[in-house]
């Protein structure tokens, strides 16, 4: 795996690979990688011939007081995990390389970025959309890969790519989970052993609420209450939201039908954990 840190280097390498006939798959990440990220690299490698991964902890998607400074980092381990997943090129820029001067140009999305996580993180998706737009212009991949774990992020990127005609295919990869259902996340490192053990409540709440829908419940408010009731069995966890929304607009559903996203965000000690299920309800 080749490792580069400048925009000029990554462009030169990708241009050369493209001239050789390679199809480029791209996986943007913030590092501190785990099997979830590896599953994205493997998917990129299966559908393409050359996989490019970026590791960049993007300051513009963190608000003051959030965990930008303490976000976990382990360059050597990340490198090993990427090599073993089959990554061909790692782009690891500095903040100065990506933002040589204060940005005045942003990508913002109406409505989509103000719902769910956008309520407690009002500038987050502007930062995400802007850095992904920059990375897509830098790497110019044929296909870009995102995890379903960050369901709202995936929707924001799909919509940006669609609205602004980015010439790239967006592909999603299922959430990689621990044995007890907890979605793998770099931020799980913030959990104490006791919190970690109890953190599977997010998955258990989503699973139980989905069973209620499968049994025929179509009232969005009752399913929301069901999610909250399960989550409240861990009273020291603080629920940020528990929602049942339309998967393409993120608007709360009164009646559950069509493409549905059931999403939760919970403060567990120092961590804020998110998870979601997406499914289709016909009729
Ligand atoms: P991050 O480094 O957390 O910004 O994530 C980089 C990419 O990996 C995003 O597209 C995430 O949705 C994806 N990702 C993170 N955790 C998982 C997981 N457990 N399963 C699948 N994809 C994931």
Image (cartoon, rainbow, N blue to C red):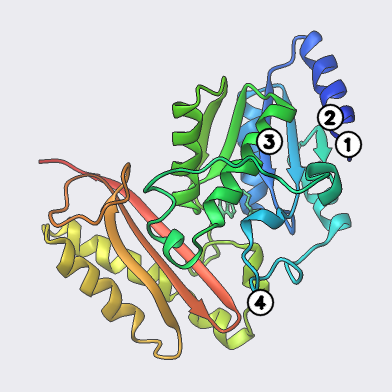
Q: Which numbered circle lies on residue 6?
A: 1
The response on whether ligand 1 sits within 8 Å of label 3 is no
The reply to whether residue 176 is visible in this rendering is no
Q: In the rendered structure, are the residues bearing label 4 and label 1 in contact, judged by CB atoms less than 8 Å apart?
A: no
Looking at the image, is mark 4 or mark 2 nearer the viewer?
Answer: 2
Q: Is 87 placed above or below 72 here?
A: above
**Which is nearer the N-term, disc 4 or disc 2?**
2
Based on the displayed image, in which of its 4 quarters is residue 214 positioned?
Answer: bottom left
Q: Which numbered circle lies on residue 10?
A: 2
Q: How far apart are marks 4 and 2 (CA)?
A: 32 Å
Residue at disc 4, secondary structure: helix
Please identify the residue farthest to the front as the structure is shown.
Answer: 104
Looking at the image, is mark 3 or mark 2 nearer the viewer?
Answer: 3
Q: How many labels does the image show?
A: 4
Q: How far apart are marks 1 and 3 (CA)?
A: 13 Å
Q: How far apart are marks 3 and 4 (CA)?
A: 29 Å
The response on whether ligand 1 sits within 8 Å of label 2 is no
In the foreground, 151 or 178: 151
Circle 2 residues within 10 Å: few <14, some 14–19, many ≥20 = many
**Which is nearer the N-term, disc 1 or disc 3?**
1
């Amino acid at each position: 795996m080749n490792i580069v840190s400048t925009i000029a280097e990554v462009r030169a390498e990708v241009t050369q690979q493209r001239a050789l006939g390679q199809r480029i798959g791209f996986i943007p990440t913030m590092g501190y990688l785990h099997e979830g990220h590896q599953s994205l690299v493997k998917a990129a490698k299966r559908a393409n011939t050359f996989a490019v991964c970026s590791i960049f902890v993007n300051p513009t998607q963190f608000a003051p007081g959030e965990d930008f400074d303490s976000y976990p980092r382990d360059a050597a381990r990340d490198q090993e995990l990427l090599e073993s997943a089959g990554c061909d090129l790692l782009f690891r820029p500095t903040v100065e390389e990506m933002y040589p001067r204060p940005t005045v140009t942003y990508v913002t999305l109406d409505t989509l970025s103000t719902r769910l996580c956008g309520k407690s993180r009002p500038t987050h998706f502007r930062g995400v959309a802007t850095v992904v737009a920059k990375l897509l212009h830098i790497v110019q991949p044929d296909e870009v890969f995102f995890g379903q774990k960050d369901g709202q992020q995936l929707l924001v990127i799909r919509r940006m790519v669609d609205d602004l005609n980015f010439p790239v295919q967006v592909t999603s990869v299922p959430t990689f989970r621990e044995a007890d259902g907890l979605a793998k996340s770099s931020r799980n490192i913030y959990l104490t052993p006791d919190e970690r053990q109890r953190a599977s409540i997010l998955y258990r709440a989503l699973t139980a609420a989905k069973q209620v829908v499968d049994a025929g419940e179509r009232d969005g408010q009752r399913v929301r209450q069901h999610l909250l009731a399960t989550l409240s069995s861990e009273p020291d966890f603080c629920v940020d939201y528990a929602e049942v929304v339309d998967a393409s607009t993120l608007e709360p559903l009164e009646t559950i039908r069509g493409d549905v996203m059931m999403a939760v965000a919970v403060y567990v000690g120092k961590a804020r954990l998110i998870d979601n299920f997406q499914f289709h309800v016909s009729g």
